[in-house]
Amino acid sequence: MPTLVAKPPQGDGWTHEVKFDGYRSQMVIDAGHVRIFTRRGLDWTSKYRDLAKAARDLEVESAIIDGEVIVTNEAGLSDYKALRKAITSRQHDLYFVAFDLLHLNGHDLRDMPLEDRREILQAMIPADGRIQFSQALPGDAKAIFALVDQAGLEGMVSKRKDSKYRSGNSTAWLKTKAYRIDEYDLLGVEREAGKPAFALMAERGTGRYVGSAFITLNQEMRERLWERIQEHSGPAPRGMKRPATQWVTPGLIGRVKHLRGEEDLRHASLQAFWEEGKVLPSKAN
């Protein structure tokens, strides 16, 4: 499991790949039988019937492959939100993106350097199939990440070329995620003495609570926010009990910067706010 970092590592000792937005999975092939497991060890072979069929066509006796099950959108990008629906009704649209090889034909490869494991893995996988190889991205890490961000991808994973495969959290694998900016309904503000203030946000249209965002407004905007909170004070949404929170009635919209590829807000910050139906403040920080 890669460790989240703010910036990708530099140097020739690292290889970099796209971080796909899907379900981390393990494909086990043994004498023509295929099983596909989730990250938590659940057997989802029946949900991935087409992928299991494609795996049986690989010219190996046995193998354990680490990868990601994804579905792509019209732009060709992995689409996490569409994945669940694809599993139940669009099996033919699923892909398994393979990025590591643990075992092959009875041999344990986990102590081999990563770049050697991946070289063997790439040779196993034919082009243009439902099982694809996660290509390394050439070039400088900083430039690669800029392109990944510009393309709207979730982020990138950097791995030490000489690393062995070890289960669990690892600093030999690092993930750098890109940010995106979205609009949410402002539910309230949580303020505790001696602690940073957080804005509680909900998905627009559904009212589903998505998490909190650190308030990073400039002083003028922050004071304006406190005024609006007082003016729009209201009861807590049904089912929500949070201490030190001042709730507001519907009508305040927040612009939030947050990690891309997460279902709920993570590493989020409130960039600006405005009242529904009014123009976004030009002095937003």
Image (spheres, rainbow, N blue to C red):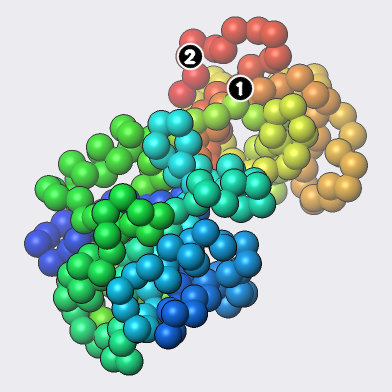
Q: Label 2 amino acid?
A: Lys
CB of mark 2 within 8 Å of CB of mark 1? no
List x then y, in percent, for residue 45. Answer: 58, 69
Residue 178, x across and y down, in percent: 39, 43
Q: Quadrant of residue 8?
A: bottom left
Q: CA distance from mark 2 to mark 1?
A: 11 Å
Q: Residue at x 38, y 59 (%)?
A: 131
Q: Which mark is residue 273?
A: 1
Examine the rendering and report whether any part of residue 68 can be seen: no
Q: Is residue 98 visible?
A: yes
Direction from residue 280 to residue 133 in the image, left or right: left
- Residue 14 image-quadrant placement: bottom left
At a point 33% along the width and 34% down the height, the residue shown is 151
Q: Nearer the viewer, residue 92 or 222?
A: 92
Q: Which mark is residue 183?
A: none
Judged from this view, the residue extending furthest toward the left is 12
Could you say which is closer to the camera, residue 226 or residue 107?
A: 107
Q: To which residue does mark 2 refer? A: 283
Q: Residue at x 83, y 25 (%)?
A: 249
Residue neighbourhood size for the residue with mark 1, other residues' Cα within 10 Å, grouped as few (<14), some (14–19), many (≥20)? many
Q: Return the residue nearer the eye: 270 or 132.
A: 132
> Could you tell me which secondary element the residue under label 1 belongs to?
strand
The N terminus sits in image quarter: bottom left
- Nearer the observer, disc 2 or disc 1? 1
